[in-house]
Amino acid sequence: MLAADRQQTGGSLGAAILLSTAVRQRLGELRGVAAERRGRRSAARAAAARPADCPVCEQVAHAQQAAISRLLARLDDPRWRSTVAHATFCLDDLLVLWAAADRRVSAGWPEVLEAQLRQIADLVARLEAFAHHSSYDRRHLLTDEERRAADDAALFLGGDPAEGTP
């Protein structure tokens, strides 16, 4: 939002006005959490962590839940299980999928999870290799996979490096 505002207007006044509304809402929620008794703070913190009411976010959440339900329902099929196991998920969606699999006690989920953890371990190895091979005397050892590792990590953590968003 800030980047778009700065690109279009050269400043950030519009974004600042919109952000102040959101921050003000969150401040009220956080003050409410602080005012709660110790035993009720957990529920109040959870309520404060929810995103603000937004019809678009609500529709996205419904679509996400529907997609997760369909993916989990199809894990009994070995081809689907393999496809989901080797798919590229961002961390947030992987965690949501995992939580839903735990609630449903999905028989195919352990295989999917193991494959996903291997992919993440491979990403860590590629990142480390990229760092190691980036010194001036080892640059000739860099592979294309290592060069893509930082972009892949940004996508995994929930951002799009092409858009510059975290």
Image: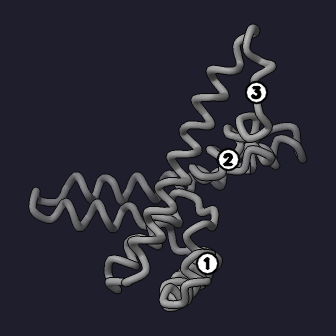
How is this picture coloured?
one colour
| Residue at position x 50%, y 62% in the image | 115
Q: Quadrant of residue 33?
A: bottom left
Front tag of 3 and 2? 3
Using the image as rendered, state which of residue 50 and residue 113 is in the foreground: 113
Which of pointers 1 and 3 lies earlier in the amino acid sequence? 1
Which residue in the protein does label 1 denote?
60
Label 3 or label 2, whichever comes before in sequence order: 3
Q: Amino acid at mark 1?
A: Val
Q: Residue 103 in the image: x percent, y percent?
A: 32, 81
Label pair 1/3, CB-CB below 8 angstroms? no
- Tag shown at residue 142: 3
- Residue 24 location (% of width, % of height): 48, 53
* Mark 2: amino acid: Asp
Q: Is residue 86 visible?
A: yes
- For disc 2, the marked residue is 152
User: Quick check: 137 above or below 109?
Assistant: above
Q: Amino acid at mark 3?
A: Leu
Q: What separation in Å lies between label 1 and label 3 (alpha carbons)?
A: 39 Å
Q: Is residue 159 above or below residue 137?
A: below
Residue 58 is at least partly visible in this image: no
Which mark, residue 143? none
Is label 2 or label 1 in front?
A: 2
Residue 101, position in %: x, y?
Answer: 39, 78
Image quadrant holding the C terminus, namely top right
Q: Residue at x 55, y 70 (%)?
A: 85
Determine the secondary structure under disc 3. Answer: loop
